[in-house]
C-alpha cells in the first residue's frame, strides 16, 4: 500500500507486470509494461519505503532481473541500477529499510552480497564483499532492520553462516556461528535493547555488539533448556517460541528480564576456581540451588542442572566451557578452560 493505493503483480495481456488499484475498477490499471509484450516484467517481491517509493526486481527483457523503483507513475517507474551487468540477473530480494536506505541481497560479478541503495545509481553499492573469493557468494539471509542497524546471516566461506550487523558505517561479525543453512531459519523478537533469534535450534540474544551476542541459558522450566527452537516472536514483554523437550514439541515463553539493561549480565563474576580447571569447578555457597548450564563456545549445551554442592564436575570436553548461573533474576557468566 502506498498513498492509499495497493500495488500488486498480475498476469494479463502484457505479461506479469506491476499494477495498482484504489479499490475501484476505474482506478485499477497497469503502472508500466516493463518487459514489453508477454514477458515477465516484475518479480514476486515488492517493498514500499518510507518515502513512498516502491522497490522491486524488474526485468525489461534486456538487462536481466535488476533493481527497479516506482513512484506509481509510468514515467517514475525506472531501473535504479544494473547490479549484474549484461543479461545475468542481479535478483535483488529480501528488502529492508534502515536510516532512509534500502538494504537487500543481490548478485553481481563479486557474488551474492548485501547491497544498499538511496534510490540513485551512484548510491547503490555493495555494503561489503564478505566472501572475497572470486565470484564468492556470502548469500545474506534472514535480513532484519532495527533502530540500530541491519542484522543478517552470511557465509564468509560460502558454506557455513555467521551472524553480522551493519550500522550504516561499520560491518561487525557478532558471532562465529558456523551454522548450516538449514539451521538459520529464524524469526526475530525485537526489543528496545536487544534482539532474540535462534541458531542451530538454540536461543540467542544480541545487543548489537560481539560481546553482547551469546546463547541464552534460558530458565524456562526449571533447569531444562528446550532445543530445536523455532518460530520466535515477541508478545508484550515476553519471547514466545516452539521448542522440543522429551515430551515433544511445545509452545514456550521466556521472560528476558534477567538479561535486560536494568539487570545486567555479570561477566566473570561467578565465585569459582580454579581457572584453568582440572575437571572440577569449586562454587561459592552463594549459588546453591541455582540453575546452571555449561556450554561450549558455540552455545551448544554440554551439561545442565541445579547446583546442590559447592563443586561441579565438569563435562569431559577439551576447550572453552562457559558456565551460566541463573539466580535472583540475574544471569552470571564465567568462561573456563580445560
Image (tube, rainbow, N blue to C red):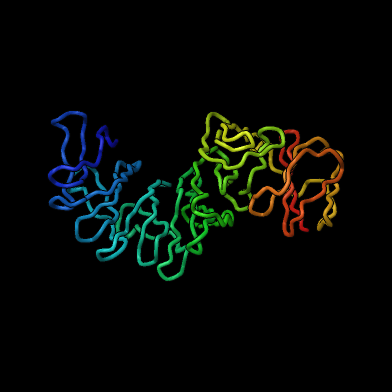
Using the rendered image of the protein, determine whether residue 243 is visible from the camera's viewpoint.
Answer: yes
- Asked where in the image residue 92 lies, by quadrant, the reply is bottom left
Return the residue nearer the eye: 68 or 159: 159
Residue 247 at x, y = what percent? 62, 33
| Closer to the camera in the image, 294 or 243 | 243
Residue sitting nearer the eye, 324 or 222: 222
One can see residue 166 in this view? no
Q: Is residue 110 left or right of residue 59?
A: right
- Name the residue at 28% across, 56% down: 66
- Residue 100, percent across and down? 39, 47
Residue lying furthest bottom in this view? 134
On screen, residue 270 versus residue 119, left or right, reads right
- Residue farthest along the front direction in this orientation: 247
| Residue 164 drawn at (x, y percent) | 52, 54
Q: Quadrant of the N terminus?
A: top left
Q: Viewed as shown, does residue 224 lie left or right of 14?
A: right
Residue 315, percent across and down? Answer: 76, 51
Amino acid at each position: 500500500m502506498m498513498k492509499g493505493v495497493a500495488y500488486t503483480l498480475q498476469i494479463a495481456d502484457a505479461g506479469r507486470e506491476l499494477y495498482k488499484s484504489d479499490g475501484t475498477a476505474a482506478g485499477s490499471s497497469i503502472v508500466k509494461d516493463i518487459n514489453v509484450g508477454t514477458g515477465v516484467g516484475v518479480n514476486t517481491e515488492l517493498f514500499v519505503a518510507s518515502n513512498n517509493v516502491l522497490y522491486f526486481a524488474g526485468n525489461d527483457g534486456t538487462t536481466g532481473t535488476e533493481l527497479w523503483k516506482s513512484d506509481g507513475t509510468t514515467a517514475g517507474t525506472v531501473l535504479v541500477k544494473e547490479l549484474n551487468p549484461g543479461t545475468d540477473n542481479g535478483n535483488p530480494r529480501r528488502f529492508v529499510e534502515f536510516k532512509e536506505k534500502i538494504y537487500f541481497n543481490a548478485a553481481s560479478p563479486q557474488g551474492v552480497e548485501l547491497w544498499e541503495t538511496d534510490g540513485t545509481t551512484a548510491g547503490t553499492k555493495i555494503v561489503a564483499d564478505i566472501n572475497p573469493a572470486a565470484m564468492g557468494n556470502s548469500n545474506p539471509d534472514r535480513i532484519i532492520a532495527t533502530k540500530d542497524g541491519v542484522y543478517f546471516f552470511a557465509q564468509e566461506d560460502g558454506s557455513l553462516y555467521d551472524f553480522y550487523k551493519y550500522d550504516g558505517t561499520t560491518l561487525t561479525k557478532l558471532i562465529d556461528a558456523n551454522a548450516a543453512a538449514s539451521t538459520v531459519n529464524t524469526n526475530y523478537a525485537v526489543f528496545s535493547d536487544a534482539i532474540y533469534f535462534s541458531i542451530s535450534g538454540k536461543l540467542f540474544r544480541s545487543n548489537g555488539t560481539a560481546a553482547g551476542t551469546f546463547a541464552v541459558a534460558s530458565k524456562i522450566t526449571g533447569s531444562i533448556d528446550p532445543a530445536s527452537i523455532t518460530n520466535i516472536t515477541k508478545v508484550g514483554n515476553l519471547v514466545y517460541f516452539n521448542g522440543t523437550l522429551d515430551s515433544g514439541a511445545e509452545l514456550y515463553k521466556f521472560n528476558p528480564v534477567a538479561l535486560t539493561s536494568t539487570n545486567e549480565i555479570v561477566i566473570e563474576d561467578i565465585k569459582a576456581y580454579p581457572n584453568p580447571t582440572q575437571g572440577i569447578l569449586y562454587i561459592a555457597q552463594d549459588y546453591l540451588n541455582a540453575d546452571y548450564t555449561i556450554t561450549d563456545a558455540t552455545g551448544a549445551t554440554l551439561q545442565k542442572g541445579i547446583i546442590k554442592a559447592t563443586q561441579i564436575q565438569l563435562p569431559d570436553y577439551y576447550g572453552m566451557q562457559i558456565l551460566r548461573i541463573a539466580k535472583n533474576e540475574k544471569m552470571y557468566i564465567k568462561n573456563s578452560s580445560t
